[in-house]
Structures are given as C-alpha cells and as structure tokens.
Amino acid sequence: MPESSRIPPASAEKKEPAPGSMEEVLIFRKLQHSFPRQFRKVFPDKLACKSVIIIPSITLDQEILGKVSGHVHYEERLLCLLMLLRMPRTHVVYVTSTPVDPVIVDYYLHLLPGITRHHALQRLTMLSCFDASAKSLTEKILDRPRLIERIKKSIPAGNAAHLACFTVTKYERTLAVKLDMPIYGCDPDLYELGNKSNSRKVFKQCGLHVPPGFEDLRNEEEIINALTELKISDPSLRRAVVKMNDGFSGEGNAVFSFAEMGESEEVKRWVSDHLQEQLKIVAGDLSYKDFMFKFQHMGGIVEAFVEGENKTSPSVQCRINPLGDCKVISTHDQLVGGESGQVFLGANFPAKEEYSIEIGEYGLKVAEALSKNGVMGRFAVDFISVKEGKDWKHYAIEINLRKGGTTHPYILLQFLTDGDYDYENGLFLTANRQTRYYFCSDNLRSDKYIGITPPDLIDIAMMHSLHYDGTSQEGVMFHLIGALSQFGKLGVVCIGSTPERAKNFYEQTVKVLDGEC
C-alpha cells in the first residue's frame, strides 16, 4: 500500500481535551473571546448566513428537577427560537432528549411571519437522543459521539455558528469545545455568581434591599444558628425560608415556621428541637434527610420570609451581549403558588405600572455589576415587593443566570410583532407602535387533560379559534404540548392589546379545554 494512502494511527489523530481540564477551559475561553467579532458582523444582518444550535438542556440537580412533572418536555420551551427561521438564511439545529412530534414543530412554523413552512423546513434540523432518562440532555449528547457528528454535518459550510442553551454548565462547555463554537451564555466558571448566596452579595453591592438573612451556610447546625439569629433580631418573625444555592423553580426551598413557639422558649433550643417538624419542604416528596444532604452539598441561605397584605413577585429579565452592553428586555409579575407560595406558576407582562420602571432600573444595576465580572447572556432578577402605604418596597431575592420561565413567552411576542420592551416607559411596543401585554403559564394542568394528544390539542384550538392572529397581533399560543397527554400539563401564552384581554384569552382557553374534556 502506498505510504500516502495509509490511514494514520489513532495516536496521530487530534486528541480532544479531557472534560473539565484546564486545556478545555482555555479552548472554551478562546471560543468565547471570538464571539464579539461574530456578533458585530453577523447579528445585525438579517440576511447573514448563520446557524444556531439550540440545546434546551435544563442541566440542574436531576433529583430536584425530577420533582417537576413532565420535566423532559420543558425542552420544548425553547421551540420559541424556531422564530429565528424568519431570517431567510438562518439555519437552526434543535436537539432534544426524545423526538418532538412533527405536529408540534408544524404548529410553531405556522407562526412564522413572512416565511413559508417549506422554506423554513429546508433550514431546520431536528435531532434527538431517543433517551427519556433523568440524565440531562447535554450529558446524553456527550454520550453520543455520532450525534455530535450529525450536529456538525447539519451546519452549512461557511456559516457563523453558536450555541443557544437553557443553562450553561461544565457539560455545555465540553459540548461547545467538541463542536468548536461559542455559547451565547454565561461562562460556567461564573455561574456561582448567580447562586442564592452570591445573589445576596451582588444585591448588597448594588444598594438593593434584601430580606434579613445569612449566606454561605453549609449544614444543619448553621441553619439552626441562622434561624435563631433571625428570630432574636426580630421577635415578631413568623416564618423564614431555607434555600439551596442551586434550587430550581422553588424546588430547592423550604419554609420554617415559628408559629408554635412560645414566648418563654429559649430560641436556639426550640429551633433545634423543632427544625424537622416545622420545616416545610417545597418538593413534597423530598425527605428531610435528603434535603439536608443536598443542602450540605450545595450550600445555601436562610432569610426572613417577606410578609405583607399587598405583596407581589416581580422579575426583571436582562441581557448582556458579547460586547458587554446591558439591556433590560422585560419585566413580569410572577404568579407563585403551591402550599408554601414558592413555586413559579406563570406571569403577567409587563410588571405593574406602579413599579415596572423602578425594578427595571434595579435590574440594570445588577446587569452592569455582572457585566464587569464577565457575565454574558440572558438572566433574570426576582423580587418580592410589598406595598407600604402608597409606596412599594422591593426586596431582591435571587439571580437566575440562565433562561427561565419568562424567556420563551417574551421571545414569542418579540418575534411575532417585531417589537421591543421600553423599560424606561414600562411598555412593550410593536413595530407599528401599538402596546401589547400577555399572561403566560407553564402550569395549566388538570387530570381531565390527560390523554389529549398534540393533534387533539391543535384540532381543539382550531375549532375554537384558540390561536394567534397575525392581523390583530393577539391570541393564544401553546407550549409544553408534549407533556399534555401523559401529565395533563400545558403551557400557554395569551397576548392582548390590554392586560384584561390577555387574561380573557387565558380564561377562554381554560373554559374550552375543560369543556372539551
């Protein structure tokens, strides 16, 4: 055999860096440092040839995430990014744990303004791991080198490419290095800036109010000491919250009640004796022992439970682009529920007129502080706001350095109307300068809905005009459609020209679904 035709030995092939190694970190940082150039050149040009690889992996603690019913279908939330296909030379590669029903993909593609379904399909690649296990999507992809090769082959030659991820952890970093492309998101080495403990520190640096509390706690004894100090400092305190640093959607939280404590009790002894029985864990099937084990592993905080007769839970969503520019992109009033009032259920957009501008300014302060530390991408700041007389007092609660429950509704609104949120006025304006509002939820659910398949839902929606109307720029859009048949759970975004119309769309949707079932 001629020398030139021999296959080189495996040892001569380029070796990939070991996951988590300094070599991998340095390669990733080099990729990230190249991103600003791509951003300047490609992002402003709607006709530029580019590819976006969407990895909707919720790479969080899998045991806690497993408490969220139908969590594998939460990977469908970023299907809102199929709206990128409205740009006629943009290619999208979307990877999921299990295949997405073509009916669901078609549902999103019909929303595209100015682009035919046929044209969009030529530029869309849907890939799947065919794996419904509890392991995170990104880990599943890393376990499948052939799938990684298919992702690479799906990118047209010469296209600028980047990854869009729900969260960015060490696993997404490894995937970025294997694919040789940057991520539009926060470097995982900076991710801890957004945990519960460091969030409180950032808020204090920015001059924002935080509930009385303690950070960087590591074990049961330190939780007892923190609860004791809070009660001694404020004898009227009724409840406190214990939070793991990396909890998700309230599932890493627990609420401690002082309600049964007598006035003559020695505080520390009472807290120590009653911690297990008085600590209500949000994830109901997570035992006290498991909660404490995870808390010891993650660390966390204890802070006073903010009370108030007139209390809301607003959030501010911000974006730091690859050039370091900060922008407030939305405000919401979140609906939280569950027995402890800690679980995210839905949101109104924008936040109340009384304070949307004010909390937008607070969010921008946090964005500027994070930008100085090198943070990039979307993130949200959550508040608890209490009306005191005529004014509102806003307590900053946490930073989520990732996409979240208010990301996809806003992206849909923005792409469908070609509009933008003006945080200085607290209003969203469409391209023709009309205001729009929405109500959204990830938790429209009922046991009666179990058994409704994606085609059934689309049929129901069409028969009852539960759809988005591009002419009026109002209507209803569904997500988490894949979770409906098994879990009776659905997501919905209801857009209206007034907050009342948006809520009416939602109420009509519930009425129709209940009637059909």
Image: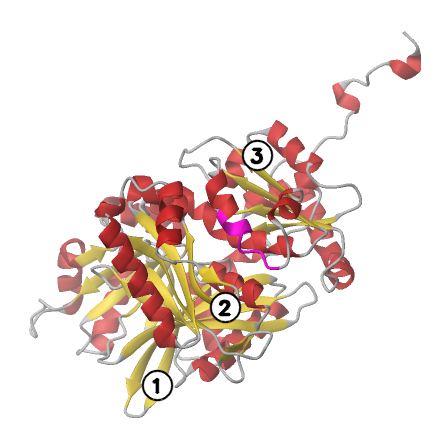
Q: Which residue is mark 3?
A: 142
Mark 2 or 1: the one toward you: 2
Q: Secondary structure at mark 2?
A: loop
The magenta stretch spans which residues?
107-113
Please give the label number shown on residue 392: 1
For disc 3, the neighbor class at 10 Å (few under 14, some 14 to 19, many from 20) is some
Q: Secondary structure at mark 3?
A: helix
Q: Quadrant of residue 132?
A: top left
Return the residue nearer the eye: 282 or 99. Answer: 99
Return the residue nearer the eye: 31 or 481. Answer: 481
The numbered mark, 3 or 1, whose residue comes first in the sequence reads 3
The reply to whether residue 34 is in sight is yes
The residues bearing labels 2 and 1 have C-alpha atoms spaced at a distance of 33 Å
The numbered mark, 2 or 1, whose residue comes first in the sequence reads 1
Please give the label number shown on residue 473: 2
For disc 1, the neighbor class at 10 Å (few under 14, some 14 to 19, many from 20) is some
